[in-house]
Image: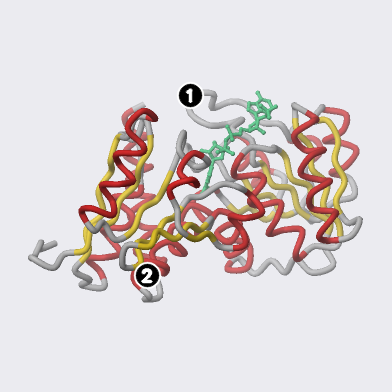
Amino acid sequence: MSISGKTRVCGVIGDPISHTLSPIIHNAAFSHLKLDFVYLAFDVKPSELENAMQGIKGLGIHGLNVTMPHKKAVLRFLDEVDQTVKFLGVVNTILNKKGQLCGFNTDGFGALRALKENRFDLSGKKALLLGAGGAAKAIALSLAEEVEELTLLNRTFEKVREIEEKLNQHFGEKVRSDTLSPGNVKKYLRDSDIVINATSVGMYPNLSQSIVPLEILRPDLVVMDIVYNPVETELVENARAAGARVITGVEMLIHQGAASFEIWTGCPAPVDVMRKAALGKLASLGEDR
Ligand SMILES: NC(=O)c1ccc[n+]([C@@H]2O[C@H](COP(=O)([O-])OP(=O)(O)OC[C@H]3O[C@@H](n4cnc5c(N)ncnc54)[C@H](OP(=O)(O)O)[C@@H]3O)[C@@H](O)[C@H]2O)c1
């Protein structure tokens, strides 16, 4: 990578941020396409968010990813947001368009693209989505546009109830919600074509946990886990053992990142290069454990 006087700066803001894979993924993509861009990680404390956002304009930073804890707080510093952000109230990508800061959320799009690239057609399908955090909400919105029926389960029931109500106002009565419990997972999975884990269960360091036990997984199911650290979560391992079709969290990670990349550069993202970079880094993290 060579830095010039015209290099465009992109990056990610969050706190903490040192664990992020995004610089590795995006710099690999910029290098591959020989784009004069660089991607950095910025550790921004909540008390410094306003200064950081002014700095983006002041320094002419071209694009940003936004991660915890700033995904909501950043909204008040933006000049425009897309429809998805209006619905979700959460931003993960910013484009600095000649001093106008525009906000996007690529999480749901990334999840959908991961499913489509893996040749899973959602139309007419019944989907079961576990979780109601930031990622789950974005995925729920994207799924509701495509599937026939969507069931949302979450440990804190009020959160899925709220998402259900909001989605049903837009998409008719195709969304329902319930409490996440072993009995309900079993009950709703029986009737589902696809199950997506969008909780943080199974994420490092709690490696041996899964919400969906092996006994209820089936070969005709599609199983997607959005947890990507580790790539082979307990759920992913169990789904493979049951003969189900599996989509790992790396696929969503890559495709939501690819969507950000395309917003900043206007170029189709080199998805294979990005995947290879992410998997390489995740493998080295696994070896260090
Ligand atoms: N692949 C990707 O591109 C991608 C993108 C974004 C996030 N992620 C991953 O997705 C996961 C969720 O991220 P997020 O940003 O949505 O997090 P979040 O907003 O903190 O939400 C966490 C979700 O997990 C649930 N949860 C946590 N511990 C649980 C437990 N022991 N039992 C049952 N449910 C539990 C929470 O339920 P309550 O509401 O009851 O607390 C909530 O629904 C993380 O592992 C993150 O790394 C992946």
Give the x, y percent position of residue 214.
74, 35
For the N terminus, the quadrant is bottom left
* Residue at mark 2 to residue at mark 1: CA–CA distance: 31 Å
Instruction: Report the residue marked by disc 2.
Output: 270
- At horizontal 47% and vertical 38% (from top left) the residue drawn is 229
Residue nearest the viewer, comparing 95 with 258: 95
Give the x, y percent position of residue 43.
30, 35
Instruction: Report the residue marked by disc 1.
Output: 205
Task: Identify the coloring.
Answer: secondary structure
Image: 42 above or below 122: above
Of the residues shown, which amino acid type is indicated by label 2?
Answer: Pro
Image: 255 above or below 55: below
Are the residues tagged 2 and 1 within 8 Å (C-beta)?
Answer: no
- At horizontal 39% and vertical 30% (from top left) the residue drawn is 46
Residue nearest the viewer, comparing 79 with 152: 79
Dot 1, crowdedness within 10 Å: few (<14), some or many (≥20)?
Answer: few
Of the residues shown, which amino acid type is indicated by label 1?
Answer: Pro
